[in-house]
Amino acid sequence: MNLLLISVDSLRLDFAPGISAMVRTPNFCELTRGFHLSQHCFSVSSATRPVHTSLFTGLYPYEHGIEGQQSPAIRQGFPDLFDLCQEAGFSVRGFSEATDIFTGLPFARHIAPFPAHPHALSNLTQTADPTLLFLHYWGVHTPYGAADGLAFGEIGRLLASGRIDLVQERYCAAIERLFENSIAPILAGLDLEQWSVFIISDHGESWRPDEPYHGQSLRNDVLRVPLYYHIPQTGNPPPNGELISLIDLFPTFLSLLQLDHCYQGFARDIHNGEMPKHYLAEIDPGPIADGPANSTDLFAGNTFGRQWALFDANAKFTYDESTRREEFVATFSEQPIVDLSDKSSYHQAYAAIRAASKYAHADFSSGADRGILQERLKKLGYLA
């Protein structure tokens, strides 16, 4: 069995191909006509580094230690998907359009820039060896192809002036380019009898004054993500349960690829496990600034602190540890739930999840030099 895992950075659920009428991707949609498309998948965070670390380890951000984009070091004592596949004899290859985002993370050594020749990826899918191929695309990330390359340049000015319609036009065009010109050709060359394919987004986009893009909150705009998958000889059944989390993909891959690992995290195989009482999402936001132009010239300063959210299929409780703001809403609609009862049960449940982790008390690795990480994040548009 081979696994192709594609991560499309910053793709909102409601703008995903096959869901949004604003996005036209006929080739991709035809190639994935038999795939399952889940609209009930939630991310574990709203920033790239914590989400991908959870994806590859099956651990929540507080467990592995990458709680925000600027977290420099991961905890020790657990393998990642790349290591497990390599130990099992798989050919392991990863490519990213933004390799610097993984600076200091142990799996970064498996992820290289995309090859210059487009046929190189197709050649990798023709190998006889069992293969894990990871592809991370940045083209849907801000600034959606803007010539200045700045999230708070041309696109930021459009957002600040209320022209979200033009921002969304740029966003849709970026999605169409990526799915039709990059992803569809790879899928067209796959033998789907031999390859399992999972296509995800790590987080969405917000386009709100207090969160112009992502990485500041745990709202559904940034937390709900599409999940497309194909598993040979299964008919691609839907997941068990009313919702799933990206964290569930790790034990799903362990089962699918028959990897030997004594996983003791909170996630479950999407087809064989029971839903937990609550899923968890966390974010420790950094400043919303970009390149040489500070975002506060266009938007109000960041008022968010470290946040966590516990949710099931019915209700979602979010807590900001700095401001002590609480939000209690319906999980999918985010309509406020009028409930005057004490929410201490959610705080107790979060404390219990943290205490029960088999991984959260391990020491940190040396990780990335903080100055180098910040310089690379600056080049990617995260810091002033």
Image (cartoon, rainbow, N blue to C red):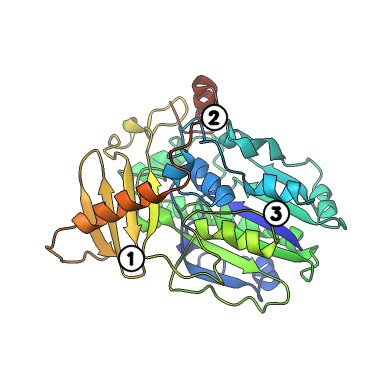
Residue at point 39%, 39% (across, down): 157
Residue at point 33%, 65% (across, down): 331
User: Along the line of sight, which residue is nearer the eye, 161 or 359?
Assistant: 359
The CA distance from mark 2 to mark 3 is: 35 Å
Q: Position of residue 180 (x, y in %)?
A: 67, 60
The CA distance from mark 1 to mark 3 is: 33 Å
Q: Position of residue 164 (x, y in %)?
A: 39, 52
Residue at point 55%, 64% (across, down): 227
Query: SS of the residue at dot 1?
Result: loop
Relative side of 220 to 330, left or right: right
Mark number, residue 321: none
Residue at point 48%, 36% (across, down): 362
The residue that disc 3 covers is 182
Q: Determine crowd level at label 1: few under 14, some 14-19, many 20+ residues with C-alpha closer than 10 A.
A: many
Q: Is residue 163 visible?
A: no
Mark number, residue 365: 2
N-terminal of the two: label 1 or label 2?
1
Q: Position of residue 284 (x, y in %)?
A: 37, 39
Q: Position of residue 358 (x, y in %)?
A: 47, 47
Q: Amino acid at mark 2?
A: Ser
Quarter of the image containing the C terminus?
top left
* Vertical side of 185 occupied by 98: above or below: above
Relative side of 63 to 126, left or right: left
The CA distance from mark 1 to mark 2 is: 35 Å
The residue that disc 1 covers is 331
Task: Indicate which label's residue lies in the foreground, 2 or 3.
Answer: 2
N-terminal of the two: label 1 or label 3?
3
